[in-house]
C-alpha cells in the first residue's frame, strides 16, 4: 500500500513554511503521476485534435471566412478548453479515489491544515491542465491562428486562470461525493451543458432566448470568449462579428479583463466552499 508523503514540522520554521511544504509535497506527488502516464496525455490530446481537423475542416467550407479567420479559428479556443478541462477535472477524480482507497486518510493526519492539502491538489490539477493546453498551441497554424509570441503568452496566462477555476470546480464536487462512480456520473451530466452553453462549438447568439441565461451564468462561456477575443485581436483586421460574438449583458460585451476577473472570483469561491467542507470531512 502506498504510504502518504511525510510532511513533518521542521525545527526552526514557522507554521507558514510547514503549510507551503505540504502544498509542495501534494503538488509534486500528483505531477509525478501525470508525467509518468504518457498514454493518458496522448489520449487527452487526441479528441480535440480530431475535432479540430475533422469538424473544423469540414465546416469551415460551409461557413464564411473573414480576414483569414474561419470556423477552425472559431473552434480553436473551444479545443483549448477541452484540453484544459479533462486534467483539471481529473484532480477531483484523484481526490475521490484517494478517499475510497484510504490514502486520503493517511494524508490528513499530517500536521497541517486540511485546506492546505486541497490547495496542493488544485495547484497540481491547474498545472497539469495548463501543460495539456500548451500541447495544442503548436497546432494553432492549422486553425489559421498566427504564431504571435505576445498572443501565445497571453493565451498561456489565460489558460492558467481557467485551469485553476475548472480544478476548483472538480475538487469542490469531489469533497461532496465519496464514490468514484457517482462522481463520474455527475461529471457526465455537467460537462455537456457547460461545454455546449459556452460557445465552444457554435456562437451563443444561435441559441434560443430561453437558453441565454445559461450562457450568461456559465463561467466557461467567459473562458472561451476571453481566449477567442485574444486570438482575434492578433488579426490585422476585423473578423466576422456574428460568428465570433460571445456572452453579453443586455447587449454589452464585457472586456476580457473583466471576464478573467469573473473566472478568478468563481474559482476562489469554489475553492473556499470546497476547503471548508474538506476541513470538516473524513
Image (cartoon, rainbow, N blue to C red):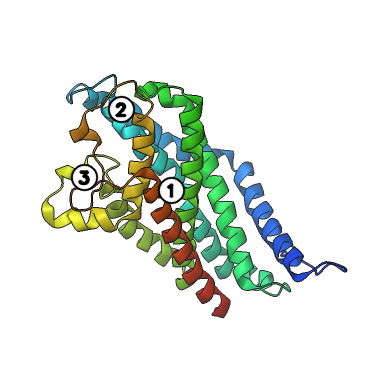
Q: Which mark is residue 249?
A: none
- Identify the element where label 2 is drawn: helix
The residue nearer to you, when weighing 194 against 180, is 194
Task: Tell me if label 2 and label 3 are in contact, CB under 8 Å.
Answer: no
Please give the name of the residue rendered at 67% of the width and 69% of the height, measured from the top-left corner. 107
At x 31% / y 34%, what residue is drawn?
75
Q: In this figure, which residue is indicated by the disc labeled 2? A: 72
Q: Position of residue 130 (x, y in %)?
A: 52, 43
Badge 2: few (under 14), some or many (20 or more) residues near its Cα, within 10 Å? Answer: many
Marks 2/3: CA–CA distance: 17 Å
Which quadrant: the N terminus?
A: bottom right
Q: Nearer the viewer, mark 2 or mark 3?
A: 3
User: Left or right: where does residue 191 sit relative to residue 183?
Assistant: left
- N-terminal of the pair, mark 2 or mark 1, is 2
Q: Residue placed at 70% from the left, 75% from the top?
A: 109
Which residue is at a point 25% across and 53% down the rendered structure image?
A: 215
> Looking at the figure, which quarter contains the C terminus?
bottom right
Mark-to-mark CA distance, 2 and 1: 20 Å
Q: Earlier in the sequence, mark 2 or mark 3?
A: 2
Element type at mark 1: helix
Q: In the picture provided, is 103 more to the left or to the right than 186?
A: right
- Could you tell me if the residues under marks 1 and 3 are in contact, i.e. CB atoms within 8 Å? no
Which residue is under mark 1?
A: 85
| Residue, disc 3 | 204
User: Which of the 4 quarters of the picture holds residue 186?
Assistant: bottom left
Amino acid at each position: 500500500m502506498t504510504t502518504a508523503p511525510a510532511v513533518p514540522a521542521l525545527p526552526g520554521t514557522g507554521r507558514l513554511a510547514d503549510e507551503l511544504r505540504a502544498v509542495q509535497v501534494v503538488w509534486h506527488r500528483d505531477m509525478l503521476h501525470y508525467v509518468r502516464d504518457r498514454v493518458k496525455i496522448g489520449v487527452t490530446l487526441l479528441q480535440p485534435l480530431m475535432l479540430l481537423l475533422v469538424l473544423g475542416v469540414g465546416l469551415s467550407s460551409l461557413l464564411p471566412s473573414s480576414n483569414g479567420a474561419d470556423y477552425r479559428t472559431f473552434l480553436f479556443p473551444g479545443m483549448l478548453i477541452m484540453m484544459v478541462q479533462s486534467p483539471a477535472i481529473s484532480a477531483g477524480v484523484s481526490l475521490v479515489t484517494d478517499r475510497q482507497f484510504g490514502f486520503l486518510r493517511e494524508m490528513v493526519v499530517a500536521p497541517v491544515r486540511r485546506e492546505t492539502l486541497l490547495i496542493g491538489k488544485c495547484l497540481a490539477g491547474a498545472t497539469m491542465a495548463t501543460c495539456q493546453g500548451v500541447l495544442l498551441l503548436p497546432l494553432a497554424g492549422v486553425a489559421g491562428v498566427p504564431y504571435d509570441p505576445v498572443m501565445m503568452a497571453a493565451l498561456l496566462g489565460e489558460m492558467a486562470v481557467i485551469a485553476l477555476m475548472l480544478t476548483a470546480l472538480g475538487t469542490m464536487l469531489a469533497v461532496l461525493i465519496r464514490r468514484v462512480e457517482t462522481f463520474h456520473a455527475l461529471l457526465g451530466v455537467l460537462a455537456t451543458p457547460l461545454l455546449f452553453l459556452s460557445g465552444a462549438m457554435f456562437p451563443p447568439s444561435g441559441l434560443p432566448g430561453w437558453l441565454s441565461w445559461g450562457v450568461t451564468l456559465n463561467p466557461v462561456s467567459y473562458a472561451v470568449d476571453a481566449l477567442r477575443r485574444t486570438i482575434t485581436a492578433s488579426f490585422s483586421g476585423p473578423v466576422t462579428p456574428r460568428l465570433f460574438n460571445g456572452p453579453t449583458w443586455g447587449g454589452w460585451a464585457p472586456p476580457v479583463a473583466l471576464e478573467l476577473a469573473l473566472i478568478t472570483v468563481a474559482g476562489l469561491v469554489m475553492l473556499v466552499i470546497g476547503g471548508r467542507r474538506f476541513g470538516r470531512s473524513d
